[in-house]
Amino acid sequence: MTTVSHNNSEPAIRIKGVSVGYATKVILKDLTLDIRRGEIIFIGGGSGAGKTTLLSNLTTLNRPLAGEIWIGGVDVANADEDALQGVRREFGVMYQLGALFNSMTVLENVMLPMEEFTSLPLGARIEVARAKLGLVDLAHAANKMPSELSGGMQKRAAIARALALDAPIIFLDEPSAGLDPMTSADLDSLIQTLNETLGVTFVVISHELASIFAIAHRFAMIDGKRGGLVEVGDPRVMRDSSPDPLVRRFLNRQGVAVHAVTASA
């Protein structure tokens, strides 16, 4: 098995010349981006930009059509399954709909990664899972079923599960989807707190501008029509002074102007 490296001088994730898509359809091409350790970076773009496809490649569910994705000193784009199993302990994932198992309690859901990747005894797994639920203010909900939780609480439980192995990188897929503005703001605050207290690197797939401006250290805009990375930087600076009009329109919620043509009599 390939040994996972923890060289702090390296980025948390290094994406080099990556192209993603399906079979002969390329959605994003030649994408290069370093994700820094300890940052909150949002990756977003318009509909069809390739956000979900890119996430599936970053989390090793799929492999890119070309290029390299380095996590923990391993190129997951080209690694064998044994190496991938080692790297999968380096990150946790919160999917858009939470992906909690409805037949299990919240506590049992949080314990799942430990059952798959560790040999901890049951008592230790329970103790760790309760601690993770405490981090997301859900200690009181340990014995509830997912169906008994609100949408925001389900997202928090999914984050607790993503934290179960103390992974240094957490991927969040549209964390604010389906939440009201106040619940979304509370979730943003939680992500920021976990980043500051635990030093976790958060890679957030989202186009939710309120969240981007509230907590993102950087924003990486991708665009399927252009086929790759458009710009990356401080979202507030990009909104106000990006040299790219598409970036400014996106971050200022401006659509493309449509000019009506009136026929003369």
Image: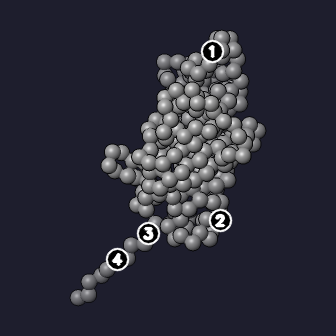
Residue 222 image position (x, y, % from top left): 50, 56
Above or below — where is 83 with respect to 19?
A: above
Residue 56 image position (x, y, % from top left): 47, 40
Q: Categorize mark 4 by other alpha carbons within 10 Å: few (<14), some (14-19), many (20+).
A: few
Q: Categorize mark 1 by other alpha carbons within 10 Å: few (<14), some (14-19), many (20+).
A: few
Q: Categorize mark 3 by other alpha carbons within 10 Å: few (<14), some (14-19), many (20+).
A: few
Q: CA distance from mark 1 to mark 4?
A: 66 Å
Compare marks 1 and 4 and give the one earlier in the sequence: 1
Residue marked by disc 2: 237
The label nearer to you, 4 versus 3, is 3
In this picture, residue 62 sits left or right of residue 139: left
| Quarter of the N terminus within the rendering | top right
Residue placed at 70% from the left, 17% from the top?
127
The label nearer to you, 2 versus 1, is 1
Q: Assign a secondary structure to mark 3.
A: loop
Residue placed at 64% from the left, 55% from the top?
218
Q: Are marks 2 and 3 in contact (CB under 8 Å)?
A: no
Residue marked by disc 3: 256
Q: Are marks 1 and 3 in contact (CB under 8 Å)?
A: no
Residue 164 image position (x, y, % from top left): 64, 26
Specify the quadrant of the image occupied by residue 241: bottom right
Q: CA distance from mark 1 to mark 3?
A: 55 Å
The label nearer to you, 1 versus 4, is 1
Q: Amino acid at mark 1?
A: Ser
Compare marks 1 and 3 and give the one earlier in the sequence: 1
Residue marked by disc 1: 119
Residue placed at 52% from the left, 18% from the top?
104
Residue marked by disc 4: 260
Q: Is 30 in front, or is 104? A: 30
In this picture, residue 201 sits left or right of residue 155: right
